[in-house]
Image: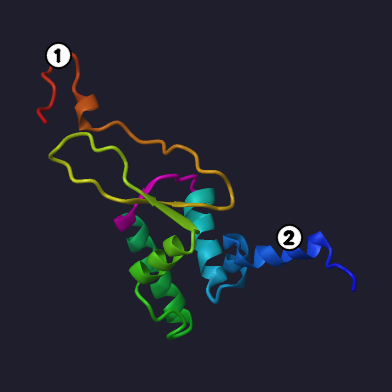
Amino acid sequence: MREIPAAFDRVSGLVRHPTWMLLRADHAALVLSFCGTVFVDENARGVPETMLESRLDDRLYLLNERESGSFPRPAAAYLAEWTKNGWLRKYYPPVPSAITPPHPDLRWRGGRTAQPAVRAPGPEHLASPRTPPIPR
């Protein structure tokens, strides 16, 4: 009896890889086009979950207007599925103060290694040297 080549086992193992699963997903075109627009074309890295959900909701509305019922679930359900499948990464950025609650950001994995988020300075950086700092 002949042995199965190791290359076959390697390729067979790819079926469980997140990228392979993405390409086989029912809504692969939605995932790739939406994440490509937000994270690649617009060069966004850490996007608050509420903002991403709102933008996806707008996209779903337009797509459902074009072909009724093609995307029946709410935007939050799609984002949750994409995160569960490893296509988006949810993380909680450092909280600047104990008063501000953390909000999850979502980041497209896109087959690349994660890079640190570029964050804008908080309101405490807006104070000029002549004005007292904003209290926390």
Report helix, strand or loop for mark 1: loop
Place of residue 9 in the rendered image (x, y in percent of width and height, measured from the top left): 75, 64
Q: Which residue sits furthest front?
A: 1
Place of residue 5 in the rendered image (x, y in percent of width and height, measured from the top left): 84, 63
Residue 60 vertical position relative to residue 136 in the rendered view, above or below: below
Look at 83% across and 67% down and name the residue there.
4
Report helix, strand or loop for mark 2: helix
- Judging by the rendered image, the residue that carries numbered circle 1 is 130
- Judging by the rendered image, the residue that carries numbered circle 2 is 10
Dot 2, crowdedness within 10 Å: few (<14), some or many (≥20)?
A: few
- Quarter of the picture holding the C terminus: top left
For the magenta stretch, what is the residue range?
Answer: 42-50
The image quarter in which residue 120 lies = top left
Look at 26% across and 49% down and name the residue there.
103
- Quarter of the picture holding the N terminus: bottom right
Residue 119 vertical position relative to residue 12 in the rendered view, above or below: above
Is residue 47 highlighted in magenta?
yes
C-alpha separation, residue under disc 2 versus residue under disc 1: 64 Å
Type of amino acid at the residue the image marks with label 2: Arg
Place of residue 77 in the rendered image (x, y in percent of width and height, measured from the top left): 36, 71
Place of residue 90 in the rendered image (x, y in percent of width and height, measured from the top left): 38, 52
Q: Are marks 2 and 1 in contact (CB under 8 Å)?
A: no
Dot 1, crowdedness within 10 Å: few (<14), some or many (≥20)?
A: few
Tell me how the rendering is colored: rainbow
Q: Which residue sits furthest bottom?
A: 68
Q: Nearer the viewer, residue 23 or 33?
A: 23
In terms of sequence position, does the residue under pointer 2 or pointer 1 come before the other? 2
Residue 74 vertical position relative to residue 19 in the rendered view, above or below: below
Look at 18% across and 23% down and name the residue there.
127
The image quarter in which residue 119 lies = top left
Residue 104 vertical position relative to residue 18 in the rendered view, above or below: above
